[in-house]
Image (cartoon, rainbow, N blue to C red):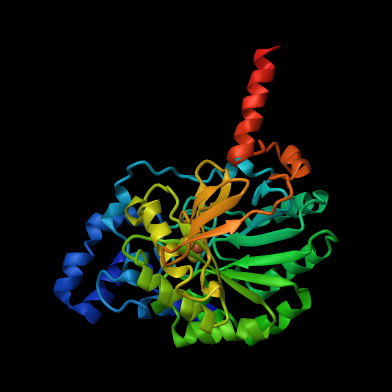
Amino acid sequence: MSDWQKTLRDESISTLEQLHGYVAERFGTDVAEREIDVQALGPAFDNFQMRITRESLSQIREVGDANWNQFIPSVQELEVVDGVIDSLDEDGDSPVPNITHRYPDRALFLVSPVCASYCRFCTRRRKVGDPEKISLKEYESAFQYLAAHTEIRDVILSGGDPMMLSDQRLEYIFQRLRAIPHIEIIRLGSRITSHLPERVTPEFCEMVQKYHPIFMNTHFNHPDELTPAAVASLDRLSKAGISLGCQTVLLKGVNDDPRVMMKLMHELLKARVRPYYIYMADQVAGGEHFRTTVQKGLEIIQALRGWTSGLAVPQFVIDSPGGGGKVPLLPEYVEEINDEEVVFRNYEGKRFTYKQPKQPIPVTVPGIAAQQGVVPIEVGKAAKKKRAARRRKSANG
Ligand code: SF4
């Protein structure tokens, strides 16, 4: 057993009784009695596995803070309002076990059913926590599917957390994927740098370099997660040549505050991690109490864009419920757009006008629009004239 596996086993909390004891010791017996009602939390624990690593526990500063909320079970998980089990219908786009193929040139490959710490808002809780939920015996059909689909050039290893696999198993997966000529990019979706930074071992960093280009999408939701140990693990990954991005989930009671998000983005950049996405929390059953409004997300983007470096501004997206994929959302900057000019406001609310070019330029790319079944959008006065002419023509037969 490696050191990180031993740390995970010996120093994590994985029962409500252990959690009660930990909280009593750290915050006092009265707090433990009030916050960790073992009886009442039992059903939440039964619904979704709990494990909190030493590192995740160290990120909690006080009861009810951002990192407490991310990892400590709550009876609110049992108040199902309108959440659904598979809110993104990933299983609907799964042609073979462990693969979700939703977008044209990339596929998701679920390789691990477990995580170091379990986040109480997890979208994939239906698949995560129980080793039976993602069968490691079912890799073969996934490899065959990826080899047969030459349009797939980018594979995202996810789960659970792929970094919970041993180096031997990860190397086996990398080798199999690198034997498929059309797969150009391998991505790891992993929260390990926040949950169990010691997993990023020198041996892993040496091994992974044989299989570049490898990207890692980390997952940090609050600046307090960027502990010295987490930052050091990110440094090791960077030095191993892995390109690092971060996916953040907008969560009520965790990071639904522009100042917190600004600080998070700055801390990520200092650790050489490029902020990639801020997601709206998915409509997953058991996670409703983490959801906030789309307006809050737009307010956060507006508070970042222009006020800090563009490097620190990720895309704000909703992963469409039911499986429509990610859709980017932007605050409204454009006030008017026509064939002559575009009127918009900058980040300070000041109005500017950009003159359109004089020569007529088509506003869509017809080939791409036709190929994707997109209805071309025509804007401004010229479009209105064209539509009126079409109506007249069809009225005249
Ligand atoms: S690390 Fe990811 S997959 Fe695991 S519990 Fe957290 S959000 Fe879910």
Residue located 18% across and 78% down the image: 28
260 versus 153 height, above or below: below
Residue 269's x, y, as percent? Answer: 53, 79
Residue located 31% across and 63% down the image: 253
- Residue 41 visible (yes or no): yes
Q: Nearer the viewer, residue 349 or 303?
A: 349
Is 10 left or right of 360, judged from the image as shown?
left
User: Which residue extends farthest top?
Assistant: 397
Q: Nearer the viewer, residue 243 or 183?
A: 243
80 versus 19 height, above or below: above
Residue located 76% across and 55% down the image: 143
Q: Nearer the viewer, residue 148 or 4?
A: 148
On-image quarter of the N terminus: bottom right
Q: Nearer the viewer, residue 364 or 148?
A: 364
Residue 263's x, y, as percent? Answer: 41, 77
On-image quarter of the C terminus: top right
